[in-house]
Image (spheres, helix red, strand yellow):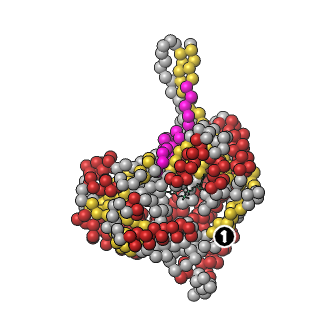
């Protein structure tokens, strides 16, 4: 049996984390113009392991002069990358995808240490990142323009797809590698060069990604990484040398980024938050729908996912029996050390996130507009110092309550009853977000009717969209604008030139 530390951690648990951290984490450095910079006047930030709360690494903070250098390096590499033949771009992107697959075991551990997601989730997300690169590797030789019939007079009138230039890619912490690949794949395929701002809460997978870019021979300056916090991000998005900003993060930060980008009229694409409704009709496959509702609504990624179905709407006739099933699904989940392969749910990203979500739970429990069906507490004992919260479900939530309308970004599911499709849609639309939506029904007409009516960039019926790289994903309203994935995701990084040649 393992001994316990003063704070209650099992010694074996802490040692495992320390050993892995020492073996896999180094200081996350700046990668700029093919050079590594591991100290700056801006200093460093500590990185804490979400599972233990211990400092396990640090990241260098890129200040405005390092951001300047990275943007200049990206600018200097632009002409060369843009004119690199399509087949060479394709093989480099494929090599990068292969390098992710070859290093998947390391990337899996790094990802768990980065953000506390489970091994299976991190591994699948990293492989999905490779899949995005593979998909976009197929585009450089397919990006083509049009010849437009011209009048009046004789002319050759055609369009040419051109890269924007230098792209600033602001990457989220809850899936940092896949997010990097979703932005870098199409940006590079279209001939842009990129400066990535890695997330301060999860910088290490992106650091390893930069090493892989170097190892497979992505030319210096084509991909640059600047770690750091909000100030680094602000320096990047307001930089006059940046031609396009692609941001994934919160709505509040997105508004600041748009304002900063407005100074240079830099175009932006914004992938923001969500409050996705999961509408379960009485004719649905109840067992399948309950498993999905519980796992994706309160367990997966500890609720830290923009598209997760955290607003559960259940048709009145089946509500009580359905909620019993959802509660039992959630209560059977193993919460704990995400390095343990049996764990289905790890910690939240930070002590701040845990405390913020805990206070939302306490506020909702005290306000009386709902019934707490399960969860609501922190984990104690061995996990006392980690950022854990139990998966939490509130039932019979008042549709006007904050927990029915606002994104929580934690393991909290809010459930309500509905009587009619109209009522379900009206509750679902009681938020300014419009990213994703879910419907469970075996009635094909109802499925299409509701999918058509739901305000969301993506609707899943009787399951959850695995978001293959060929699929466009994005939202509207407070969920932002622009698309990632598929041809639309590529076109975010392309602008069209028209050429008119009088004959
Ligand atoms: P956040 O907006 O607080 O931070 C995101 C990034 O912006 C960080 O790298 C931060 O350093 C940087 N930043 C902060 N202030 C800045 C400023 N003034 N200028 C420039 N950069 C600045 O987001 P978060 O809380 O870390 O992430 C959670 C949010 O992200 C949630 O709302 C979630 O729904 C959303 N998200 C969306 C998607 C999607 O694909 N739509 C995916 C994951 C997460």
Residue in the picture at 26% in, 54% down: 421
Secondary structure of residue under mark 1: strand
Answer whether residue 244 is visible to the viewer in this image: no
Q: Position of residue 103 (x, y in %)?
A: 62, 59
Residue range in magenta is: 479-498
Taking 405 as reference, is 13 left or right?
A: right
Of 180 and 229, the residue lying toward us: 229
- Residue bearing mark 1: 56
Up/down of 37 relative to 291, above or below: above
Badge 1 density bin: few <14, some 14–19, many ≥20, Cα 10 Å:
many
Quadrant of res 365? bottom left
Q: Position of residue 281 (x, y in %)?
A: 27, 59
For ligand 1, which image quadrant applies? Answer: bottom right
Residue in the picture at 72% in, 44% down: 73
Q: Position of residue 269 (x, y in %)?
A: 53, 45
Quadrant of res 42? bottom right
Whether residue 484 is in magenta: the answer is yes
Residue in the picture at 24% in, 56% down: 420
Q: The C terminus appears in which quarter of the rendering? A: top right
Whether residue 20 is in magenta: the answer is no
Q: The N terminus appears in which quarter of the rendering? A: bottom right
Residue in the picture at 56% in, 67% down: 352
Up/down of 176 relative to 73, above or below: below
Answer whether residue 368 is visible to the viewer in this image: yes
């Amino acid at each position: 049996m393992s001994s316990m530390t003063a704070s209650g951690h099992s010694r074996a648990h802490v040692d495992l984390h320390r050993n892995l951290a020492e073996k896999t984490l180094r200081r996350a450095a700046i990668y700029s113009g093919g050079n590594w910079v591991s100290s700056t006047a801006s200093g460093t930030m500590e990185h804490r392991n979400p599972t233990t709360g211990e400092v396990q690494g640090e990241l260098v903070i890129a200040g405005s002069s390092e951001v300047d250098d990275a943007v200049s390096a990206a600018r200097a590499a632009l002409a060369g990358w843009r004119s690199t033949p399509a087949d060479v771009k394709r093989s480099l992107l494929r090599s990068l995808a292969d390098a992710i697959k070859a290093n998947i075991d390391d990337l899996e551990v790094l990802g768990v240490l980065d953000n506390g997601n489970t091994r299976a989730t991190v591994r699948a997300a990293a492989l999905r990142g490779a899949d995005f690169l593979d998909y976009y590797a197929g585009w450089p030789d397919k990006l083509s323009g049009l010849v437009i019939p011209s009048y009046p007079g004789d002319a050759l009138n055609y369009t040419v797809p051109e890269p924007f230039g230098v792209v600033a890619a602001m990457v989220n912490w809850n899936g940092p590698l896949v997010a990097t690949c979703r932005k870098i794949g199409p940006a590079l395929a279209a001939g842009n060069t990129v400066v990535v701002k890695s997330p301060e809460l999860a910088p290490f997978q992106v650091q390893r990604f930069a090493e892989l870019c170097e190892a497979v021979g992505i030319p210096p300056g084509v991909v640059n990484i600047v770690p750091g916090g909000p100030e680094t991000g602000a320096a990047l998005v307001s930089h006059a040398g940046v031609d396009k900003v692609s941001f994934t993060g919160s709505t509040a930060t997105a508004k600041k980024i748009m304002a900063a980008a407005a100074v240079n009229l830099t175009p932006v694409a914004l992938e923001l938050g969500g409050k996705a409704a999961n509408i379960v009709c009485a004719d649905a496959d109840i067992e399948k729908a309950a498993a999905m509702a519980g796992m994706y609504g309160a367990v997966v990624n500890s609720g830290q996912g923009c598209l997760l179905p955290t607003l559960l709407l259940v048709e009145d006739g089946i509500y009580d029996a359905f909620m019993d099933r959802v509660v039992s699904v959630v209560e059977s989940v193993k919460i704990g050390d995400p390095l343990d392969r049996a764990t289905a749910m790890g910690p939240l990203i930070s002590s701040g996130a845990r405390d913020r979500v805990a206070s939302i739970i306490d506020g909702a429990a005290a306000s009386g507009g709902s019934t707490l069906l399960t969860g609501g507490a922190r984990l104690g004992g061995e996990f006392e110092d980690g950022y854990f919260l139990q998966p939490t479900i509130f039932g019979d939530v008042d549709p006007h309550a904050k927990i029915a309308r606002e994104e929580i970004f934690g393991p909290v599911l809010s459930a309500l009853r509905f009587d009619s499709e109209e009522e379900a849609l009206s509750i679902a639309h009681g938020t300014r977000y419009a990213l994703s939506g879910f419907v469970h029904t075996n009635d094909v007409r109802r499925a299409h009717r509701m999918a058509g009516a739901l305000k969301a960039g993506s609707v899943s019926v009787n399951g959850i969209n695995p978001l293959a790289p060929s699929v466009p994903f994005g939202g509207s309203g407070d969920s932002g604008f622009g698309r990632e994935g598929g041809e639309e995701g590529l076109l975010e990084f392309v602008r069209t030139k028209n050429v008119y040649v009088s004959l």
